[in-house]
Amino acid sequence: MMKKFINKPEAFVDEMLEGILAAHPDQLRNVADDLRCIVRADAPRTGKVALATGGGSGHLPLFLGYVGQGMLDGCAVGGVFQSPSSEQALEVTKAIDGGKGVLYIYGNYGGDIINFDMAAEMAEMEDIRVETYVAGEDVASAPKGEEGKRRGVAGIFYVYKCAGAKAEEGADLDEVKRVAELAGANVRTMGVALSPVIVPEVGKPSFTIGDGEMEIGMGIHGEPGIRRGKLLTADEVVQEMMDQIMPDLPYEKGDEVSVLMNGLGATPKEELYVAYRKVAEILKGKGISVVKVYVGEFATSLEMTGFSISMLKLNDELKGLLMKGARTPFFEQAAL
Amino acid sequence: MMKKFINKPEAFVDEMLEGILAAHPDQLRNVADDLRCIVRADAPRTGKVALATGGGSGHLPLFLGYVGQGMLDGCAVGGVFQSPSSEQALEVTKAIDGGKGVLYIYGNYGGDIINFDMAAEMAEMEDIRVETYVAGEDVASAPKGEEGKRRGVAGIFYVYKCAGAKAEEGADLDEVKRVAELAGANVRTMGVALSPVIVPEVGKPSFTIGDGEMEIGMGIHGEPGIRRGKLLTADEVVQEMMDQIMPDLPYEKGDEVSVLMNGLGATPKEELYVAYRKVAEILKGKGISVVKVYVGEFATSLEMTGFSISMLKLNDELKGLLMKGARTPFFEQAAL
Amino acid sequence: MLTIETAKRILHTLNETMAQNQDRLIEIDSAIGDGDLGLTMSKAFRTADEQMADADEDDPGMLFAKAGMAMAKAAPSTMGSLVATGFMKGGKAVKGTPDWDAADVATFFRAFADGIMERGKTRPGNKTIVDVLDPVATALEEAAGRGADPAGVAQAATEAAARGEEAARNMTSQHGKAAIYREQTVGKQDPGAVAGMLIIQGFFSVF
Amino acid sequence: MLTIETAKRILHTLNETMAQNQDRLIEIDSAIGDGDLGLTMSKAFRTADEQMADADEDDPGMLFAKAGMAMAKAAPSTMGSLVATGFMKGGKAVKGTPDWDAADVATFFRAFADGIMERGKTRPGNKTIVDVLDPVATALEEAAGRGADPAGVAQAATEAAARGEEAARNMTSQHGKAAIYREQTVGKQDPGAVAGMLIIQGFFSVF
Ligand SMILES: Nc1ncnc2c1ncn2[C@@H]1O[C@H](COP(=O)(O)OP(=O)(O)O)[C@@H](O)[C@H]1O
Ligand SMILES: Nc1ncnc2c1ncn2[C@@H]1O[C@H](COP(=O)(O)OP(=O)(O)O)[C@@H](O)[C@H]1O
Ligand SMILES: [Mg+2]
Ligand SMILES: [Mg+2]
Ligand SMILES: [Mg+2]
Ligand SMILES: [Mg+2]
C-alpha cells in the first residue's frame, strides 16, 4: 500500500520542484524554462569556478539541496532514480559558467555518466571548459582494488563541501578538481537498510526485506548489499559496518576524521545518535580523533528505513575547507 | 514488528544522549551527573536571560536540539513521550541562570506543567527568578475560544527562535517572556498522520491507522485528531488543513507570514515540498505574503509518517527576531 | 497512633500494594490514558520504600516528605509528581510530631489533598485522584473530631476512598491525556482515583 | 535504397516495434536491471517518430541525427542516451547523401556502434547492445562489399543481430545496474541487446 502525500505520481518530481522553488526563491531558480534545471539565484558568479551536479530524484537533500553558497552552483534533476538528460545538464552548465569553467561532480551511475559526458562535449563546443569528478565511495558496492566501480552515496556530501569551499576561495578549475579528487579519495561509506521504498510511478515496493531482517551494504536504490540477515542490535550493526569501512582506506591510529551519520529516510534521528555512540566508541578505541560530526539526512532514498556511515580522513587542507561556512536551502553551516 | 536500530529498549534514551554528547561536545554538555540535564557548553552566560525547555524524548530535534546560540540554554530530557523530573528541570535551571533569570518554554502537557511548576518553585527558593510560557498552538486539539487547552507541537520552534533571539539581544526576563507570548499567540499548527509509532519500551504500535487511511489533526503522541478518513491527494490534505488554520488566528489579506513544513519522521522531504507547493498557492490566492519558509524535521514523533503545517504571523518585531542567526547542533541559520 | 516505625511499615505496605496492582493500573490507564500508571506507581513506591527503609530519621513527617522527594525523582509522570507532592506537603504539615494522633493524620491528608489540588490546578469533580483524597481528608477530620480510635479512623478513610473512587467513575475527565477523550471517559474508572484509593487502603491497613 | 521517405518510415516502424515490445523489454530489464527499458524505448521512439514525421528535412542523415537529439531529451536513461548517441553519430557520418546505398547503411551502423562504444566506454563482450550492433556493422560492411541487394543487406543485418543477441546471453554484465548481479546474469538475455535487435529488425523490415 502506497502511503504518500502526492497528487498524480507522474507529476511528483515537477510538483516537488515547484514547491522547492516557491519555498526558496531567494536561493534557487530554474533556467531554460525547465523546472529540472536548477541553479543558484545569483548564478552565474563571475570569476568563480562553477560546480554542477545532477542525478535522479528521491534522494533529498541530494542533489539539488547542496546548490548554494559555499557548495554548488547548479543541478540537473532527473526523474525518481533516473538520470537527467544531457540537454538539462548542458543548460545548467551554460547558466552557471562564470568564465572559469565548470566542474561536474556526480555519483558513479551509468546513466548519469553517459548524460554528463554528452553535456560536457556539448559544453566544450560552446567554449565552456568542463572537468568531471565521478564520486564513488560505497565500500559495499565493489571490493578494494576496484574502487572505480563503486557507487556514489552519502559521502559525496564531503566532496561537494570541500570542492565548493575551494571554488569559493577563487581557486582555478584544476585546483578545485584536485580537491574534489582528494576528498573523494579519503571518504568511505557503508549503509544498512531495513525496508524498501516505493517509487511513486511504480506504486509498489521494488524489492522486499523480510520482517526482522536487515541488509548490510544496500545501495540507495535498493542495490543488493553484502549480507542479508536477522536485524541485530545497533551496536552490532555499527560494528559490522565499521569493520568494513576502517580497513578499506585504511583509517588508522592518529588520524583525524569527520563522520557523517546519514538517515536514509524513515529512520529517526534518535536512532542515528544511538548508532553514533558506538561509532565514537570504536574510533576512540582505535585512537582516531573526530573533528566534526554530521547527523541527519544528507542522502536519502524516499522513505527507506536505514542509515549510512561515511568517514572523511582529514589533512590540513580538507579540514580547513570543511570548516568553511556554507548556506543552501537544505544545509547551513557557520564558519568554524 | 519493531524495526529499529537500538540496543536495549530501556537504554534507548540514555544511549541517544550519549551519542548526542559525543557528537557535539563543542556545543552541548550535561550537568548534575545526569545525562538528561543538557545545557549549552558555554552555560551559564552571564548577563543574558536563560531559556530552558524540556519534555519527552522521541521528538528530535525537539526539545534539546534547539539548545544553542540564539535559541535555548538548557533542556531537561524525559523518557520517550514522558516528562522529565522536576529535579532535572531544577538542575538545568541552576546551571544556565546567568543572573538575569530563566524563562521556561515547553509544550502544554499535564506532566510537563506539573514538573516544571515544581522546578520553578524550587528555583525561586534558591533565588533564581523563573517565568514560564506554556506553548500550545495545535488547532486540532481544542476549539477556538479554548486556546489554553491546546497541545504544543511544531510551532514551538517559532517561540524558541523569537524569544531566543530577544534574549541574545540582552533583553530582560519580562521582555523575553513578552516575545515568547507574542510569538506563541501568532502561531497555529495542524498535523496529519498516516502511520503509528512504536515506543521502544512498549515494542508495539500504540494505535493503528488502516491501510489507505489518514488522520487529520493527530497529535505527536498519537492523540486523536479531527477526522479519520481515506488518504486524499496532497493538495486535498493541505487544503483541509489550511481551511482549519487560516480562520483560526485569522490570517488575512496583507499579512506577512513564515511557514514551517514539518515532517513527523518518515515522510520524505520530497513530499513536504509537494505539500508546500499547495500551501504557497493557497497563500498567494489569499494575498498573504511569505517571508521565510522552513521545510524539514523540526518536531517529530519517532518514525511516524505525516507532517504538520505551522504558520507564524509576523509583525516587524517578530520578523526581525526570526531573521537573526542561530546555531545549535540541529538547527543553523545565518543572520538574514 | 503513627510513629516512625508505622511510617516505614506504611511505605513498605504501599510498595507491596502497588506491585500487586501494577497490571490492574496499567489496564485502567490504558483505557483512557497511556497505560503507564501501573509502572510509575510501582516504581515510585518501590523507590520510596527502598530509600526510606534504613533512613536515619525519627520524624514521620520528615520521612514522608523525603519519600515524596524520592518519588518525584524516580517517577516524574503526572501521578508520580502529584503523589510525590502530596507526601511532601502532608509530611511538612505534621513535621516535628514523633507520634501522630488522629488529628495529625487528618492534617497530613488535608495538606496532601490540597497540595495536589494546587499543583494540578484542579478541584474535586474533575475525575482525578483528588476525588478520592478530598473526601478522605474530610472523613478523617470528622473522625478525629468525634474522637474515633485508630480502627475507626482507618474505616472512615477507606470507606470515603471507595465512595470517592466510585463517584469519580461518572465524572468527565478534564485533565491530562484522558481529557482528550472527554465524554467517552464517563462511566470508566479514573486511573488516578484508583491509585489514590489503593494508597488509602494500603496506608490504613497497618492500623 | 534509403531516402528521406524511407527514413521517416523507419522511424515510424521503430515507434510501433517498441510500443509492441514494451512489456517484453520491461520484463527482461526487470530480471537484471530496474525494469524501465520498455518505457524508455517506447518513449524515445514515439518522440522521435512524432517530431520527425513532418520535419522539413530531406537529408536522411540529418533526420536520424535530429531524431537522436529528440530521443536524448525525451528518454535520458542509459539506453535512451546511448541509442540517441548512435542515431546522432550515425546520421552525421552519412550527412549530405539524399539516397543511401548499402555502403552508406554500413557506414551509418559502424558510426552508430562505435559512437555507443565510445560513449559507454565499452567494447564487444561486456553483454550490452554493442554485442548486437558491432556484428551488425561488420555484416553490413561485408554485404556492401559483396554488392548485396537491399533484401540481402537486410537479411545479413537481422541475422547478425539475432546471433549477437544470442551470444550476449552467455556473457557477464559489466556495466550499469546489471553489473551488480555479475555472474547471476550469465544465461539471461541482456535487455539492451534485445532492444538493439529490435532496432535492427524494425529498421530493416522496411526494405
Ligand atoms: N491536573 C491534574 N490534577 C490532579 N490529578 C491529575 C491531573 N492530571 C491528571 N491527573 C490524574 O493523573 C492520572 C493519570 O496519571 P498518569 O498516568 O501518571 O498521567 P500521564 O501518563 O499523562 O503522565 C489521572 O487519572 C488523574 O487522576
Ligand atoms: N556502458 C554501457 N555501454 C553500452 N551499453 C550499456 C552500458 N551500460 C548499460 N548498457 C546497456 O544498457 C542496458 C540497460 O539500459 P537501461 O535500462 O536504460 O539502463 P538504466 O535503467 O540503468 O538506465 C543494458 O542491458 C546494456 O545493454
Ligand atoms: Mg498515564
Ligand atoms: Mg504517561
Ligand atoms: Mg533499466
Ligand atoms: Mg533506469
Image (cartoon, coloured by chain):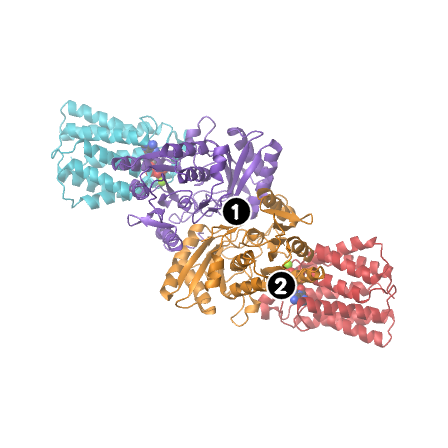
Chain colours: A orange, B purple, C cyan, D red
Decide which of D201, A50 is in the foreground and name it. Answer: A50
Q: Position of residue D134 (x, y in %)?
A: 73, 72
Report whether residue B239 is seen. Answer: yes
Q: Residue furthest left?
A: C99
Amino acid type assigned to the residue bearing label 1 in the image: Thr
Please name the amino acid that badge 2 sits on: Glu
Q: Which residue was labeled with disc 1?
A: B267
Examine the image and state in which quarter residue C28 appears: top left
Q: Tell me, yes or no, whether the two marked residues, 2 and 1, touch with CB atoms within 8 Å.
A: no
- Quadrant location of the N terminus of chain C in the rendered image: top left
Quick check: A289 left or right of B271? Answer: left
Could you tell me residue A122's position as x and y percent?
70, 60
Callout 1 secondary element: loop
- Whole-angstrom CA distance, mark 2 to mark 1, is 36 Å
Q: Residue at x 21, y 37 (%)?
A: C65
For the residue pair B53 and A205, the one nearer the viewer reads as B53
B334 or A298: which is nearer to us? B334
Badge 1 sits on which subunit? Answer: B
In the displayed structure, does residue B329 sit left or right of residue C143? right
- The residue positioned 83% from the left and 54% from the top of the image is D55
Crowd around label 2: few <14 · some 14–19 · many ≥20 (10 Å): some
| Quadrant position of the C terminus of chain C in the picture | top left
Q: In x, y percent, where is residue A280?
A: 39, 59
- Near mark 1 (Cα within 10 A), the count class, few <14, some 14-19 or many ≥20, is many
Ligand 6 within 8 Å, label 1 CB? no
- Chain letter for the residue marked with disc 2 in the picture: A
Q: Nearer the viewer, mark 2 or mark 1?
A: 2
Are dots 2 and 1 on a single chain? no
Quadrant of res D66: bottom right
